[in-house]
Amino acid sequence: MFANDREQLRRFYQQSWQKFQDGQPLNALEQQVALVMREHPEYHQAIFQDNALERDYQPEAGEANPFLHLSLHLGLREQIKTDRPAGIQAVYYRLSSQMEAHAAEHLMVECLAENIWAAQSQGTEPDEAAYLNCLQALQPT
């Protein structure tokens, strides 16, 4: 959608949320962004900080990247919708029947983030089987 332009993607998040706040019409993708933003009020201020578009977040320093977290939710929701990898819908439905749906997503996002991080660190493609194994091993907390 935005290739590798981090600033453009972050600006899209800002614009989508602002349009939602202003009651302006949203396209389908803007609606998805606004929905996930609405579920994360802890990030509302962070995405509009002066340096939000260019800021590098340091996870080793305990900094959460709000744009990454929101993107992981959006990616996960698309995976659930398309059941790709096969079986992810079943995991989601099992977990969300035992806890609030957003809490289930948070558990699942951890597996997604771990899988992406492992692939990037090893310079490989994400391991779909390892990802699905991680998801299937999830238990409600």
Image: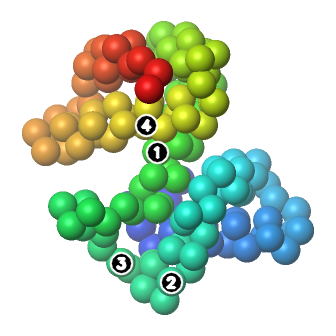
Question: Which residue, given by chain and number where applicable, does mark 2 sit on?
Answer: 49
Which labelled disc corresponds to residue 109?
4
Q: Left or right of 100: which side holds 28?
A: right
Helix, strand or loop for disc 1: helix
Mark 3 or mark 1, which has the lower sequence index?
3
* Residue at (31, 20) in percent of width and height: 134
Q: Confirm or deny contact between disc 2 and disc 3 (CB under 8 A).
A: yes
Can I make out residue 20 in this image? yes
Residue type pointed to by label 1: Leu
Residue 45 or residue 2, whichever sits in front: 45
Residue type pointed to by label 2: Gln
Residue type pointed to by label 3: Arg
Question: Which residue, given by chain and number where applicable, does mark 3 sit on?
Answer: 55
Question: Which residue, given by chain and number where applicable, does mark 1 sit on?
Answer: 72
Q: Position of residue 42 (x, y in %)?
A: 56, 64
Marks 2 and 4, Cα distance to the nearest angstrom? Answer: 25 Å
Looking at this rendering, what residue extends furthest in the bottom direction? 50
Above or below, 69 against 67 in this view is above
Q: Confirm or deny contact between disc 1 and disc 4 (CB under 8 A).
A: yes
Q: Left or right of 117: which side holds 42?
A: right
Q: Position of residue 141 (x, y in %)?
A: 44, 26
**How many C-alpha atoms fall within 10 Å of the one at disc 2: few (<14), some, or many (≥20)?**
few
